[in-house]
């Protein structure tokens, strides 16, 4: 039996941002409590147990289009690169500061692994994406010097939708879902823990793989709790634990860019570190509750307890479920290997057609370096940054290119330098 949340069908397309949208939606839902769904989970491989479970399920991916009334007089989507009025610049700067600080604020509790992946791709883009989900639209300065919001933001592209479908279908190969109505954040989190307990039990009992498993820890004690949903865990032929990340490719012939490889590697390594923290018993449930502002003494709803009893989980509080979940992980070995599997996103049965797979070597020094850089932003130690000069090609695929603060600032610096040389 397994339990998962609203965003458990999240996927990461080549642009590496879809999961973040999904996770963000989940975190928003959790903050207000909300309902859920119950599912049955079928086992894979040797396990015969296919008992029912509670899962919150979402029927589809929302295409989000945000439209705002134009302000000011301009309507051009081209950022003016020369001199702008002091007032326009001030409004533009203020808008960016508000978006950045608001996003930093909502991530004070914990960071989703998908945020981190998006951050690795482009930190500025991550800010705009999360901000847009919160209703904060980046503004741009027109050729006429007016400050206007970006007219339309489409947060889910067809390629992302296709990627989500692949993840969803792969998930449904091993899990099926039924509704469970819950009204508190604590009950909702308990369902996630129960799903993870169910997953681990299946793997220990001999299932060949488990998918969409919620995990969390505070990697390397940097002070940030990270939470994510690992695509797949399986035992390989040597009875070692293997971690699998599923990625989709809209262009099956195009070689992976270095940036894609780096982003995918970061995600796989973070997941390995989290799982190793869990299997070695260093995760403190009380710290997790503190970070999530949850009460371990919260007495669970009878509907949640029903699922707990079906899994032989004793106790009736959120803390009891956490204790069982952490105990369960001690039955698993550390992650021995990591694989990224690539599937096409351009046809119906794509989830069955493995295009290629790539092994990832764990590099603790590199991982720590990347985490220190990224956490530096969340701690407020440095300003948001955009892409490096050699990865400017990413901007051509970015919907925020016209409004991008990072690009404008770099451009302004360039113009200033050129003017000083004259
Ligand atoms: S335009 Fe470039 S730097 Fe700005 S958010 Fe998009 S990808 Fe990042």
Image (cartoon, helix red, strand yellow):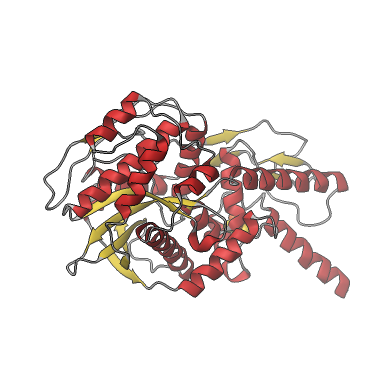
- On the question of residue 32 being in view, the answer is yes
58 lies above or below 204: above
The reply, left or right, for residue 213 in relation to residue 131 is: left
Instruction: Indicate the quadrant of ligand 1 in the picture.
Output: bottom right
> In the rendering, at what x and y percent does residue 410 appear?
72, 63
Q: Is residue 315 above or below residue 331?
A: above
**Viewer-proximal residue among 259 and 228:** 228
Residue 29 located left or right of residue 129: left
Which of the image's four quarters has the C terminus? bottom right
Q: Nearer the viewer, residue 89 or 293?
A: 293
Q: Is residue 264 above or below residue 12?
A: below
Q: Position of residue 296 (x, y in %)?
A: 46, 37
Q: Residue at x 61, y 49 (%)?
A: 127
Residue at 49% over, 69% down: 367
Instruction: Name the residue nearer the viewer: 353 or 182.
Output: 182
Q: The N terminus appears in which quarter of the rendering?
A: top left
């Amino acid at each position: 039996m397994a339990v998962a949340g609203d965003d458990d069908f999240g996927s990461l397309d080549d642009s590496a941002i879809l999961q973040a949208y999904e996770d963000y939606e989940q975190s928003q839902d959790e903050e207000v409590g909300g309902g859920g769904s119950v599912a049955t989970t079928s086992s894979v491989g040797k396990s015969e147990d296919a008992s029912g479970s509670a899962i919150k399920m979402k029927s589809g991916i929302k295409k989000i289009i945000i439209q705002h009334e134009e302000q000011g007089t301009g309507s051009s989507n081209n950022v003016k690169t020369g001199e702008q009025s002091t007032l326009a610049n001030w409004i533009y700067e203020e808008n960016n500061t508000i978006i950045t600080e608001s996003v930093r604020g909502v991530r004070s509790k914990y960071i989703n692994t998908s945020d981190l992946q998006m951050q690795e791709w482009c930190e500025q883009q991550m800010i705009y994406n999360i901000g847009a989900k919160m209703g904060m639209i980046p503004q741009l300065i027109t050729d006429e010097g007016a400050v206007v919001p970006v007219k339309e933001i489409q947060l889910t592209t067809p390629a992302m939708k296709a990627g989500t479908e692949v993840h969803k279908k792969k998930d449904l190969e091993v899990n099926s879902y039924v509704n469970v109505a819950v009204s508190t954040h604590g009950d909702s989190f308990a369902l996630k823990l129960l799903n993870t307990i169910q997953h681990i039990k299946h793997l220990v009992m001999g299932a060949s793989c488990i998918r969409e498993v919620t995990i969390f820890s505070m990697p390397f004690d940097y002070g940030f709790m990270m939470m994510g949903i690992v695509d797949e865990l399986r035992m390989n032929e040597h009875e070692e634990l293997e971690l699998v990340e599923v990625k989709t490719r809209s262009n099956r012939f195009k070689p992976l860019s270095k940036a894609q490889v780096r982003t995918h590697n970061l995600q796989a390594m973070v997941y390995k570190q989290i799982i190793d923290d869990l299997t070695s018993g260093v995760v403190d449930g009380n710290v997790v509750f503190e970070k999530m502002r949850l009460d371990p003494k919260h007495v669970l709803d009878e509907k949640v307890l029903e699922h707990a009893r079906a899994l032989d989980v004793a106790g009736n509080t959120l803390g009891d479920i956490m204790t069982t979940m952490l105990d369960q992980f001690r039955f698993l070995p550390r992650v021995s290997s990591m694989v990224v599997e690539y599937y096409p996103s351009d046809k119906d049965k794509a989830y069955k057609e493995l295009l290629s797979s790539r092994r990832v070597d764990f590099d603790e020094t590199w991982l720590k370096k990347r985490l220190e850089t990224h956490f530096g932003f969340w701690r407020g130690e440095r300003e948001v940054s955009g892409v490096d000069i050699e990865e400017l090609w990413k901007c051509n695929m970015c919907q925020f290119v016209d409004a991008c603060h990072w690009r404008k600032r770099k451009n302004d610096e360039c113009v200033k330098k050129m003017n000083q040389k004259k």
